Image (cartoon, rainbow, N blue to C red):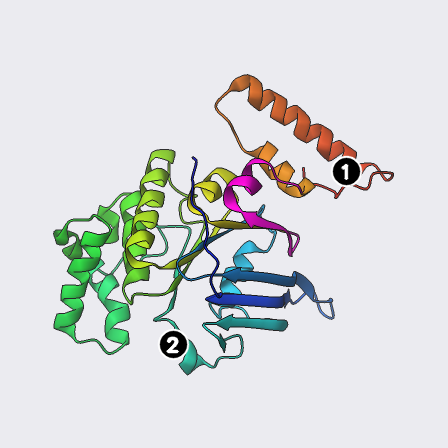
Amino acid sequence: MTSDRTSAPAPPLLACRDLRVSFPGKGWRAPRTEVLKGVDLDIRPGETLGLVGESGSGKTTIGRAILGLVPPASGTITFDGERIDTADRARRRQLSRDLQVIFQDPYTSLNPALTIGDTLAEPLVTQGIGTRVARDRVRVLLERVHLPTDAADRLPREFSGGQRQRVAIARALALDPRLVVCDEPVSALDLTTQRTVLDLLLEIQDTTGVAYLFVSHDLSVIRHMSHRVAVIHRGEIVETGDADPLTRAPSHPYTQSLLLAAPVADVNEQRERRARRAGAAAHAWCPASQTTRLSP
């Protein structure tokens, strides 16, 4: 996947400064484990910031902290000039109009007992929108994600994985948010369906101007979707920059390792990448080396 998406300077819609998150250790009196270690990042209006890293790097925790699902130990999160990391529950409910999320698994993110129409109407009704207006809004949302209007009367089990993820996207867009956290939204889908969902997200962004924090471990997906990219390793941002140059010729050893780990269609190139990655990992174990240690 390739992209020519470029970013224009603008004041940040969302800013994290020295963001730190820690979780309790295992066992009584065990020290807390610091998951995020002073993260700084910005997302501008209408922009996609790709956040890439391996499993356990802390990328999902950043999204959860922004959404108020985990409390920061220190640092600040600012949205449209307002500090939100200390917002109470009532304010968080109000912020849900502007901050939404698309989860990874389309099979578990939808309530199997609710019809698609009820699923999409739920956030609207919660915000005080009348039933008739909500029903009309559901019809518009289904059209926006290219699903038939009769989908409103059906249950999630009647849809494929890609269609369920479209429903999840429609639910995230129900309140016209300004920022959506996309947490590995296509990793559970096959490649053809991935491309369809990614192109739908780009189409919606071009139409509505919504901003995305797009979390993924896949550099090719990040390149396709993002204006800018932040690379996270062991809870720290190790490299940031415009998407195309960073994902094609990264400067940090960890990002280079991610690039070498990405699969390619050419068998010989894949074999060469695997050998180069093994050599880089072996070099990282050498005590005399000054190279950042890479994960195998």
Residue 110 position (above or below residue 135): above
Residue type at tag 1: Ala
Q: Which residue in the structure is indicated by mark 2? A: 93
Other-residue count near label 2 (Cα within 10 Å), few / some / many at <14 / 14–19 / ≥20: some
Residue at the spot of label 1: 284
| Image: magenta residue range | 233-251
- The kind of residue tagged 2 is Arg
The residue positioned 62% from the left and 40% from the top of the image is 250
> 90 or 28: which is nearer to us?
90
Q: Can residue 252 be seen in this view?
A: yes
The answer to whether one can see residue 26 in this image is: no
Tell me, yes or no, whether the highlighted magenta stretch contains residue 234: yes
Residue 129, percent from left and from top: 21, 75
Indicate left or right for 190 with 293 as reference.
left
- Where the C terminus falls, by quadrant? top right
Above or below, comparing residue 155 to residue 295 in the picture: below
Task: Report how far apart the C-alphas of labels 2 and 1 lie in the structure.
Answer: 46 Å
Among all residues in the image, which is located at the extreme right? 288
Q: Is the residue 227 above or below the residue 42 in the image?
A: above
- Which sits in the foreground, 115 or 272? 272
Residue ranking furthest to the top: 268
The image quadrant of residue 92 is bottom left
Kindly identify the residue that appears in the image at 45 percent across and 55 percent down: 8
Q: Where residue 159 sits: x, y (%)?
A: 24, 46
